[in-house]
Image: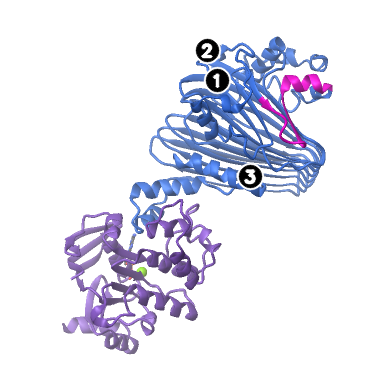
Amino acid sequence: MDVLSVRNVYEDAERAKDKKAPIGADVTIENFTDETLNAIDMIDDLDDLNRQTKKDLLKVGVDTDEKNRSGSFLQVDQSNIFTNNAMSNSVEVMNIGVALDKYKWLEDYIWNVVKPDADKYTAKTALREQKDGINSGYFVRSLPGTREVMPVQACMFIGEEGIMQTAHNVIIAEENSELHLITGCATGDDISSAMHVGVSEMYLKPGAKITFTMVHNWAEQVEVRPRTGVKLMDNSTYINNYILTSPVSTLQSYPTAYCDGENSRAIFQSIQGGKKDSIIDVGSRVLLNAKGARGEVISRAVSQDESKIYSRGHLAGTVPEVKGHLECHGLVLDDDSFIYAVPELEASSANLEMSHEAAVGKISEDEINYLTSRGISEEDAESMIVRGFLNMDITGLPDELAEQTQNMIDMSVEGM
Amino acid sequence: MLLEIENLAVEVAGKKVLKNINLSIGEGETHVLLGPNGAGKSTLFLTILGFPQYKVVQGSIKFKGQDITELTTAERVQLGIGVSFQTPPSIRGVSVRDLLKIESHQDMDEDLNPRMKELADQLKFSDEFLDRDVNYGFSGGEVKRSEILQLLAQMPDFTMFDEPDSGVDIENVELIASEIGTLLDKDKPQGSRKRSGLLITHLGYILNFVSADKAHVLIDGVISCSGNPTEILEDIRKNGFNGCVECAQCL
Ligand SMILES: Nc1ncnc2c1ncn2[C@@H]1O[C@H](COP(=O)(O)OP(=O)(O)O)[C@@H](O)[C@H]1O
Ligand SMILES: [Mg+2]
């Protein structure tokens, strides 16, 4: 705790506890209750979960059989009920509290790439930590020089009505290592309203690679505010895949990658399907702060059933010889739905290359007609086009994971 | 008659494009529709197919004895009509393989059936090619061959081809023509052919490779003459479409 108090984390948080986020609807945190830390007992095996929960987890990519996984972590409400750290010699998976006890140096990585006073949600997370200790969330680390192709799976699950779940995750890929994560967030079937704030801080040491694939499946009245920061050192590569195709109340996130190392590279790929009055505000930001750094932000958004999607992207080049590309495509399926694409390019140096491509519109009639001329009904033609539009090829995953991820996307997109 | 068009008039985007069209195609027959650019050939094709923008303001279209004028495109296709487009759109995320499965009534979860794979091979498509998004970045020849391959998956009773030879090199025209032959039962003796078709071409080039039973010339939205394909084509080659205009005036 020493390092954190020296750094004034809690004072900063205290000051920011009413600070509205710059974008996204303002959520009244007080409407949600703080669930007691570790109120739920640990389980010995993911198999001990009930059938419905298993199904809910599978939908967000978390396999309770732990097949083709290198580790597992499950947090339900405010309790870390399962951790499996024994599956790989290359990666460590622990509760963040356990990890902080084990590694003194880990404190340097806490509240470093995400600021406690960023807004009231980060502040709330920090203040809760001040009270309860840093005990919610996971720590995942790949050891230097290792390459584990199987992913670690981590899941945040909300099982109690009306609660506010917070988590603080730290992911570190040590020098020249490769680490893959599948993280799923979901709510139990009987939950109507809740709130989730997940603070995630990721660090890529020189030559490291992380792929981070996140699937969200919230309930219709859940407020979601993930806060993610990624720090990239020399020659490292970060690939973020985000998939949301189920309804939510409001969701706002703007993960930011700091390409501070030379030739570092960050890629954000996201698939957003807006349904049932959801208000989704998802952006990705890459700061290109070192020579040879590259950033790519690619998103596909489809809005229907009176949903609103704000699809943001921001690339900022601060030094010469960096490259960035932003691509944002949206389909609006009915008159009551809405997509607002905000691609931003910012260059504060000469001799850099940044481009963007944005297109928002309705489904092409020519494409529908073409499919109907093959005997496909208009309705089926529309959903085929939507699924095809969302089903982008995810790049950068090892073969073993690419197929699984594709299946996850297929499954998410199937219901659109 | 398999297809019977009576006294048809069609409007597109508020403009009258086709007038007084009468056309009947019997079982086992192949007809050609000739005519200069802008005459209304594609409009007739898309009206028979039932695209929503093409408004039938007069007359009717019957297929297999049923009035199909009010049916949707998908319903017409399910009755046994198939088409190959001149310039089809590309669709991201929809592969040729997906379409072939749907067209050959296969389950999407199954592997593509061996017969389709063989046909793809015949049309010079590799297995990887089938996973490409349909028409996306295809060459002119690839577009046409993919259209024909999809028709081979459907094997419609009545097939319409809109300019199947345009933008295709000579070698591919012969390949395409041979598959059109398959779709139109050309390998069978004339009397026992079942499948019928309408070939649309403004150059008539494809007719060097596919035989037709009857030709129609469309000029300014009107069928100006109908008759023996060889004779009409010879006349057009000698006198251009002007001859047909005069011919219509004689009628
Ligand atoms: N979708 C459309 N919108 C507006 N005009 C159209 C449309 N389709 C066809 N037309 C018009 O109808 C006429 C016939 O076109 P088309 O049927 O494409 O001729 P062809 O196939 O014989 O070259 C042209 O004047 C064309 O501009
Ligand atoms: Mg035409």
Q: Chain for mark 3?
A: A
Q: Chain for mark 1?
A: A
Residue beneath disc 1? A195
Q: In 3D space, how far apart are the residues under numbered discs 3 and 1 (Cα atoms)?
A: 30 Å
Q: What is the x, y in percent for residue A64?
A: 58, 32
| Tag in front: 3 or 1 | 3
Give the purple chain's letter.
B
Residue beneath disc 2? A31
Q: Amino acid at mark 2?
A: Asn
Question: Ligand 2 appears in which quadrant?
Answer: bottom left
Say if the magenta span includes residue A370. no
Q: Amino acid at mark 3?
A: Leu
Res. B187 image quadrant: bottom left
User: Are there few (<14), some (14-19), or many (20+) residues within 10 Å of tag 1?
Assistant: many
Q: Is residue A187 above or below residue B132?
A: above
Q: In 3D space, how far apart are the residues under numbered discs 3 and 2 (Cα atoms)?
A: 40 Å
Q: Amino acid at mark 1?
A: Met
- Residue B245 shows in the view: no
In the figure, is residue A355 to the left or right of A290?
A: left
Give the blue chain's letter.
A
2 or 1: tag closer to the N-terminus: 2
User: Are there few (<14), some (14-19), or many (20+) residues within 10 Å of tag 3?
Assistant: some
Q: Secondary structure at mark 2?
A: helix
The magenta span reads A83-104
3 or 1: tag closer to the N-terminus: 1
The residue located at (72%, 22%) in the rendering is: A96
Q: Decide: marks 3, 2 in contact (CB < 8 A)?
A: no
Which image quarter holds the C terminus of chain B? Answer: bottom left
Q: In 3D space, how far apart are the residues under numbered discs 2 and 1 (Cα atoms)?
A: 9 Å
Q: Is residue A166 above or below residue B80?
A: above
